[in-house]
Image (cartoon, rainbow, N blue to C red):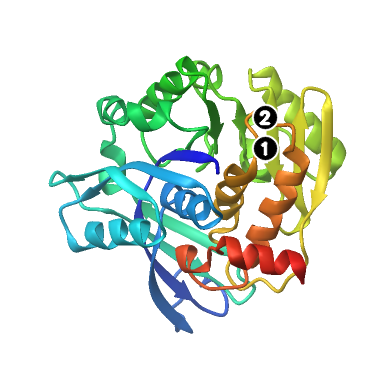
Amino acid sequence: MNKVTVLGSLNVDTILRFKRFPKPGETLPLTGKGIAGGGKGANQAIAAARAGADTTFIGKVGQDQEGDFMVKQLTESGVNDQYVQHSDAANTGSAFIMLDSSSENRILIDGGTNQQVTADDVELAKPAIIASDFLIAQFETPQAATIHGFELAHAANKTTILNPAPATKTVPTELLAVTDLIVPNETETETLTGVHITDEHSMIKGAEKLQALGVKTVIITVGSKGAFWMRGTDHGFVPAYKVNALDTTAAGDTFIGALSSVLKTDFSNLSEAVRLANRASSLAVQKLGAQPSIPTKAEIEQAERA
């Protein structure tokens, strides 16, 4: 069983569904509304835990009902919440997820306490980091905290996974220097490298540019098409499973969490781990809500047998 620590965000998601996105100045009726646990970090931790990993979370919530709700979402999925701190300086993070009839999403975020995670907070979680096989982080918490976490992991010869989302044009060189695997989607890849992802040739070019920044292993997720991986000069494309998608909100997070649950730290099973992560992601998009949609290990295994 892999041991995974996730440093990241916890958000309460408000999900708004409608037939199409409104034009400026236009008012449209909703076709549905719901509340669910979310945040890239929390989603990835829950995905890892449900897929079978021994998972610990590092993050921060407010002294509010939303914070209690988010901690409950973690613990009910088997995530260790020992390093989730409660702060009265801000509200728990929140997100508003807008979904049209084709399940395309647009997301607005209030970072709240996610923006207050510090390097000192991460230092407190050092025992979890050095006991893990993988440390995962995203960009919904301050990068200074992530850099410190990745430095602690590397000093202990642990493997780091960076999901550069939401997209930023630059990533600190000191963070890339301690990143073992970077997992952007096609939009984030273009933002970081300037390469527009359209086919395997452009995926190779984008991955090579990411490698030139200092990260040896790259996975580029391309939605319903699948995922491309490159390690050194070796590379491959793993097609996605064809399903009817209802909500793609947690697809990428489910992919990363499930990947970490089965990936070997020497990356020797990289292609197979990507395939299994694709399987988990394909199950997630068939349900509504971020965390409610994330599959369990039993559900993934059942889909494998089908």
Q: Residue furthest left?
A: 88
Q: Which residue is at the far front?
A: 1
Residue 37 is situated, as x and y percent measured from the top left of the image, at: 38, 62
- Is 14 situated left or right of 66 in this image? right
Q: Residue 240, percent across and down? A: 76, 57
* Disc 1 residue type (three-letter): Glu
Classed neighbour count for the residue bearing mark 1: other residues with Cα under 10 Å, few (<14), some (14–19), many (≥20):
some
Apparent side of residue 69 relative to residue 291 in the rendered image (left or right): left
Could you tell me if residue 203 is visible in this image? yes
Quadrant location of the C terminus in the rendered image:
bottom right
Quadrant for the N terminus in the image: top right
Query: Residue at 43% across / 40% down in the picture?
Result: 6
Residue drawn at (66%, 37%), measured in percent from left and top? Answer: 189
Rendered image quadrant of residue 89 = top left
Callout 2 amino acid = Thr
Using the rendered view, name the quadrant where residue 25 is placed.
Answer: bottom left
167 or 177, nearer to the observer: 177
C-alpha separation, residue under disc 1 versus residue under disc 2: 5 Å
Q: As rendered, which of 145 and 149 lies closer to the eye? A: 149
Please say if the residues under marks 1 and 2 sit with CB atoms less than 8 Å apart.
Answer: yes
Vertical relation: 176 (above or below) 95:
above
Find disc 1 in the rendering and name its residue: 190
- Residue 223 visible in the snapshot: no
Residue occupying the point 30% across, 39% down: 115
Q: Which residue was labeled with disc 2?
A: 193
Describe the element under mark 2 as helix, strand or loop. helix
